[in-house]
Image: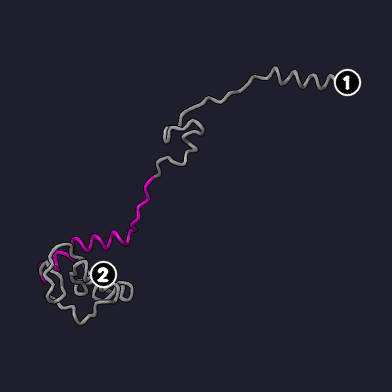
Amino acid sequence: MRGAAHIEDKNLSREAAPIITMKQSICSNCGSNKHSSLQCFQKPRKRISQRGQKTLEYETFRDTVAIPYLDKRYGHVCSVKGCPITENLDVDHIRGRGSHPQLKFDVMNLRYLCRLHHSLKTDGKLPDYRLEAA
């Protein structure tokens, strides 16, 4: 009998306990009512800068030192002999930054190339003897 009373007490305690209901809320990120905005996979993320400090240093050098130097010294034209392109020019390192890191900030190691010639040079399809300052 004692066991039966014990079981009855358990049942009573279940019935007497308040029923806790979760308030259904709408996610402010995606509009779903199945999860909270804290658990949402579509919540806005903080943008992570894709450029590091070294890249920012080089871009500052290129924009403030290299481009004005190249414009004054050679003019704003592609360095390949006979190429008349003067728009969308890239600043190219004559000797690569990877193999010659000490020349990265040397203006004497820079020249303008149009996009076509720059991509050909990068792919190794443009021999160096064709590159001459205009």
- At label 2, the amino acid type is Ser
In this view, the residue in front, 54 or 27, is 27
Q: Name which residue type carries label 1.
A: Arg
Disc 1 vs disc 2: Cβ atoms closer than 8 Å? no
Over which residues does the magenta segment extend? 46-74
Quadrant assignment for the N terminus:
top right
Task: Please tell me in which quadrant of the rendered image residue 130 appears.
Answer: bottom left
* Picture layout, residue 91 above or below residue 8: below
Q: Is residue 5 left or right of residue 104?
A: right
In this picture, is 14 found above or below 77?
A: above
- Quarter of image, res 3: top right
Number of marks: 2
Q: Nearer the viewer, residue 34 or 1?
A: 34
In the structure shown, which secondary structural element does the residue marked by tag 1 occupy?
A: helix
Asked whether residue 68 is drawn in magenta, I would say yes
Q: Which mark, residue 116?
A: none
Does 118 sit above or below residue 17? below
Inspect the magenta stretch and tell me whether residue 48 lies in it. yes
- Quadrant location of the C terminus in the rendered image: bottom left
Label 2 Cα crowd, 10 Å radius (few <14 / some 14-19 / many 20+) = some
How far apart are the two marked residues, 1 and 2, measured between alpha carbons?
Answer: 89 Å
Could you tell me which residue is drawn at 85 percent across and 20 percent down?
A: 4
User: Left or right of 129: which side holds 38?
Assistant: right
* Location of mark 2 (residue): 119
Q: Which residue is mark 1?
A: 2
Q: Nearer the viewer, residue 10 or 118?
A: 118
Q: Earlier in the sequence, mark 1 or mark 2?
A: 1
Q: Residue 111 in the image: state x and y as whole percent.
A: 18, 71
